[in-house]
Amino acid sequence: MGLPELWFVIIAVFWTGFFVLEGFDFGVGVLHRFVGRTERERRVAINTIGPFWDGNEVWLVVGGAAIFAAFPGWYATWFSASYLAVVLLLGALIIRGVSFEFRGKVDQGGWRRLWSGTLTVGSVLAPLVLGIALGDLVAGLPIDANGEFTGSFWDLFTPYGLWTGMTLLVLCLLNGATFLGLKTTDELRLRAHAAARRISWASVLVVAAFSVWTVIIADQGWAPIVVLVLAPVASFAAAWAVHRGRDGPGFALTAAAVACTVTGLFASLYPNVLVSSTDAANSLTVGNTASADYALTVMSVIALVFFPLVLLYQGWSYVVFRHRLSA
């Protein structure tokens, strides 16, 4: 495995880590208004992700920065094609982050409902937009021989991309519901269990359809098929655990389903990084978009030093804030 291939794997790990860690954040952001009947309960639901959400978003920043540094050709074409979508994503992340801080600044029902609404909208849009963008990598975008995007904003809404966005959104909802069941008590926990049960079987169907569709359009051999088969299996096992009232296994298996889904997408993409729907010869690949070996070597040393430190710190924070919260 050369350095370009290694960095493709590292980028896949960053994006998978983002959705595994930030997935339950998004889910809680959407569900806090529905599982929390009182202001105190909604505050508790938000507090379950309070110590984690901003740290988890760092994985998205690092994932994008790694593409910029390791595969500048991929970054230039993909982000240029998705410029308006990136603006929409940034808007969703901004109003979501602001809502955490502003929601409690004024003790009025209307004010809190406003910022609860922005938290919900931002938490829906972020995984949906990111899922569509990732799905477009596999489905293909109109790219010419110079590696330039020749389509319009509406060309980003490929059927497969839309389904990928919906798949990740549903998994985030289930992950958020299981996380709330793991971190809360009493009535709030019971409502989180009820939400998880309603979402769980839908997630099995959505993930299974995603896996079959990915295998059909990618046709990259057996390696991605193995991972894509594990995604609906993990979703089914998560649904079983949810209906048995097993908080820990339900959350872990849902996270595994998220990980298999995102990993399977990247495995199906390789050796391409962005498929051209205009002509397969115009597709961007790991080989023709990678940085020089010197840059990749320096990045590898930096990643080797700092990545374990980040994992240790985040793991420690989850241990410190592991207890349930009560209204």
Image (tube, grey):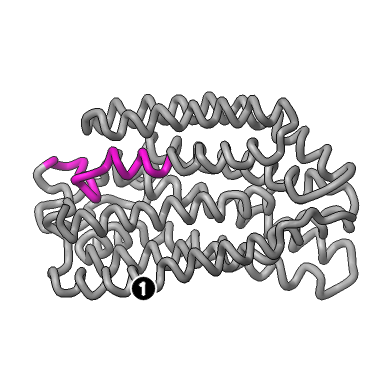
Q: Quadrant of the C terminus?
A: bottom right
Q: Amino acid at mark 1?
A: Val
Please name whichever residue, 89 or 302, is drawn nearer the observer in this view of the structure: 302
Q: Where's residue 230, x and y in %? A: 43, 30
Q: Position of residue 296 (x, y in %)?
A: 20, 69
Which residue occupies 57% across, 37% down?
A: 253
**Residue 170 in sight here:** no
Q: Where is 319 relative to 37, above or below?
A: below
**Label 1 CA crowd tier, 10 Å (few <14, some 14–19, many 20+):** few
Q: Which residues make up the magenta segment?
A: 261-280
Which image quadrant is residue 48 in? bottom right
Question: Residue 226 at what x, y percent from top left?
Answer: 34, 29
Please provide percent x and percent y for residue 20.
Answer: 52, 50
Residue drawn at the location 82% of the way across and 56% of the way down:
325
* Residue denoted by label 1: 305
Q: Tell me what residue is drawn at x 57 percent, y 27 percent.
A: 237
The verdict on residue 263 being magenta is: yes
